[in-house]
Amino acid sequence: MIHAIYVCFYNPATIVDERILGVLADNLILFLPLIYIIPSHILHLVILYVLIAPKSRKHFTGSFYRIFGIQSANNILHSSFYFLCVRGRFSTVFKSVLAALPTDGFFVAFPYVMAFYTSAALILLDFVLTFNRFSVILLKARYKTFWHRSFKYIVLFVLISPNILTWPMWFQDYIIAPPLKGYATYVWQARNPNVVSWISLSVGFAVLIIVSAVLDFLMNLYVMVALIKQQNKNQMFNQKTKSKQNEATADKKLFAVSICAFVGQLASFITQVILTLVSDKVVVNRMLYFQFFVVDYNTCVPAWSLFFMSNDIRRHILGVVGVQSASSTSVVAIATTGTDKKVTAPGKVTSTRTR
């Protein structure tokens, strides 16, 4: 199967039956990634459960985890809508699914508009997570006060601002059209694409991706330099108390989570630049396929990065699935994420204070 994909894309001269191998490759590109997409969605759902369940949410009241919970829900929605509206049109197997849907109306426009809406929200949420880590270093003691006061406004901004790009789509009268040349199945098509001619969706997304990527890079660079300086300072003055070690470790791990998100935004940035500047059809088609995996990275990797980087999240997730009790090990205090816990013995928390 993998060989079929390789032959179709990189060595077409050796194709025995180009049509059969092409169909096989298109369907594999659609369904093979489900091997990692489905487990990632399940992990996102478990993380959401841990963050909102009464027994565990008291350990994750910090702004970083609250933002991440919103991002997890958005990632599931974006991946699902993208799979239906964009990825599915390249598969012959998916043709029967699209043929069963209404051909026009609200329920045709809704998933397509939501695919773009959640894409913009994903970019903004990655930016907010990076800004969260940046504000820890920049604001120091004022960090918690700032996020306590501004959290709801930042969330409202993330939820409302994508509509600036997508609202014209509601008036473009989308239909599910029969297959066009170059596609294997039905496609979403606008009857009135120029109904709001002064707003360009592609240009708007290009600006959003470029601006957020540049700012993410600068903030991550600032945080990285600050963490290095802090580590050198602690070593110089021998300030390696256990609490400082725990706090520094937590900062580094959550910074690593934001770096993983930044890598995805960088890939989106490169893809968008190439699609904007290059007109060669072969290159554009390759980049469209590459974009599938960029979306997979942006929607799947954050859950796994948090799972492997956060001991608390991992312990509670393992407790949910019955592998390990969530209270079997001590809870490490993470000052920068918004909760302080005093531990006297493994598995026993004597007091919990949320800030």
Image: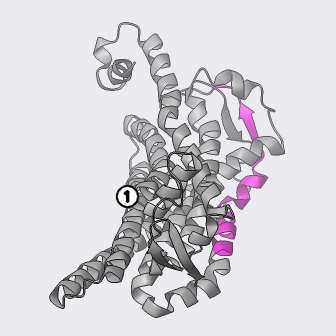
At horizontal 69% and vertical 64% (from top left) the residue drawn is: 54
- 170 or 246, which is in the foreground? 246
Judged from this view, the residue extending furthest toward the left is 236
Q: Position of residue 169 (x, y in %)?
A: 71, 53
- Regarding residue 150, the answer to whether it shows in the image is yes
At horizontal 70% and vertical 21% (from top left) the residue drawn is: 96
- 272 or 350, which is in the foreground? 350
Q: Position of residue 178 (x, y in %)?
A: 69, 26
Compared with 96, 256 (above or below) is below
Compared with 289, 209 (above or below) is below
Tell whether 270 sits left or right of 336.
left
Q: Position of residue 202 (x, y in %)?
A: 55, 55
Give the extent of the magenta segment: 155-179
At horizontal 47% and vertical 56% (from top left) the residue drawn is: 314
Colouring chosen for the image of the structure: one colour
Judged from this view, the residue extending furthest toward the right is 105
Compared with 235, 129 (above or below) is above
At horizontal 48% and vertical 63% (from top left) the residue drawn is: 312
**Which residue in the structure is indicated by mark 1?**
263
Three-letter amino acid code at the position of disc 1: Val
- 108 or 31, which is in the foreground? 31
Compared with 206, 151 (above or below) is below
Badge 1: residue crowd in 10 Å (few <14, some 14–19, many ≥20): some
Look at the numbered disc 1 and give the secondary structure of its residue.
helix
